[in-house]
Amino acid sequence: MNAIPLVLCPIDFSDSSRGALRYGNAIAAHFGAKLVLLVVNDPLLLEASVIAAATSNLVDETVREMERFFKQTLGTRAKAEAEFVVVAGKPAPEILRVSRERGAGLIVMASHGLSGFRKLFFGSTTERVLRETTVPTLVTSGADTGPSDFEDVRKAVRRVLVPVDLTPATSHQVAVARQISQKLSVPLLVAHVIEPVRALSGHPALPTVETERRYRAEAELERLTSDAADGATPEALIAYGEPAEEIAKVAGDRDAGLIVMGLHSSPLLGPRMGSVTYRVLCLAHRLVLALPPQADRMRQGEAVDTAGHVAQI
């Protein structure tokens, strides 16, 4: 299995990004990968620094602040080789640029960060990164303090939930989620939400349509979950309602700490997050591993390996 080449962890010095940093450190340390911490400074801050001092030490000052943050957050658990990178610009484009240029295998970032002048995250930055990322992105909840050791990861995940829409991308998403559940020895739940038919109540064809949709969903879920090579068959579940609300409810009811979701794509515009993933992030308050559409250059096995590294820490 290929190793993660690099884990990119954008931070904004908030408590939320401390949790993301702990996950990033655990993953990078386990695989011997480099951990790159990234801070994106506002260009106006750089300009103000130059005006005030006729020169700018902002990058050096930011690196020192990052080093303190790193040590305070991880202490003796700082096992990964760390690099501190400071750039200036708009946060999301810079995160994506650094990810591409450095060949990141995984982005780990918090869903919530600071507010005010140094605001980095959700909804603008995390949403933008998820819309355009080409590598798996692990989004941590703002309230998640992160793992203290490897066993804490399994305790945090507890159960893996993979919501599927039964499109061609579904098989890849289930394969990634299955690998994660196997490596962490936690149960896997494959769920499909049937949205209500937008038709006038009492329409004579409605019962037949609903029955057919249920039958097709059951058949596809059985196909997806019946070929478990290790003999551990994932559980399948069908729910009815609005997808994001039902996914969040299932995650809460079934105590799933990790949700594996695919990102939608467009032939012209590339990866797009979509309203369902956005609302799940808002509602579920759990780890979300977002899987971008598979690029032509990436074979499915390689994609599974890359995203599955999250499970092996």
Image (cartoon, rainbow, N blue to C red):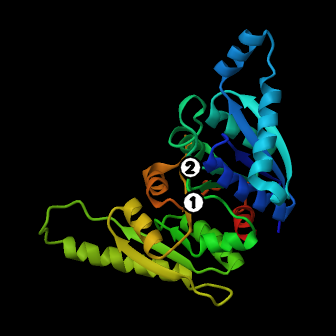
Q: Position of residue 31 (x, y in %)?
A: 84, 63
Can you tell which quarter of the image residue 230 is in? Answer: bottom right
Q: Quadrant of the C terminus?
A: bottom right
Q: Secondary structure at mark 2?
A: loop
Q: Secondary structure at mark 1?
A: strand
Furthest-bottom residue in this view: 231
Residue 49 seen in the figure: yes
Residue 301 seen in the figure: no
Q: Position of residue 146 (x, y in %)?
A: 66, 60
Q: Nearer the viewer, residue 206 or 41?
A: 41
- Total tally of numbered discs in the picture: 2
Image point (74%, 65%), residue name? 309
Q: Position of residue 17 (x, y in %)?
A: 65, 48
Asked if the residue under mark 1 is in contact with the one under mark 2, i.e. CB atoms within 8 Å, the reply is yes
Image point (38%, 66%), residue name? 246
Q: Nearer the viewer, residue 108 or 18?
A: 18
Image point (85%, 58%), residue name? 79
Q: Position of residue 13 (x, y in %)?
A: 67, 41
Q: Nearer the viewer, residue 12 or 103?
A: 12
Compared with residue 127, is residue 3 higher up or lower down, i.e. above or below? Answer: below
Image point (54%, 36%), residue name? 115
- The circle drawn on residue 111 is 2
Between discs 2 and 1, the one toward the N terminus: 2
Q: What's the amino acid at mark 2? A: Ser
- The circle drawn on residue 288 is 1
Q: Nearer the viewer, mark 2 or mark 1?
A: 2
- The circle drawn on residue 13 is none
> Residues under labels 2 and 1: Cα distance?
10 Å
Compared with residue 125, is residue 245 higher up or lower down, i.e. above or below? Answer: below
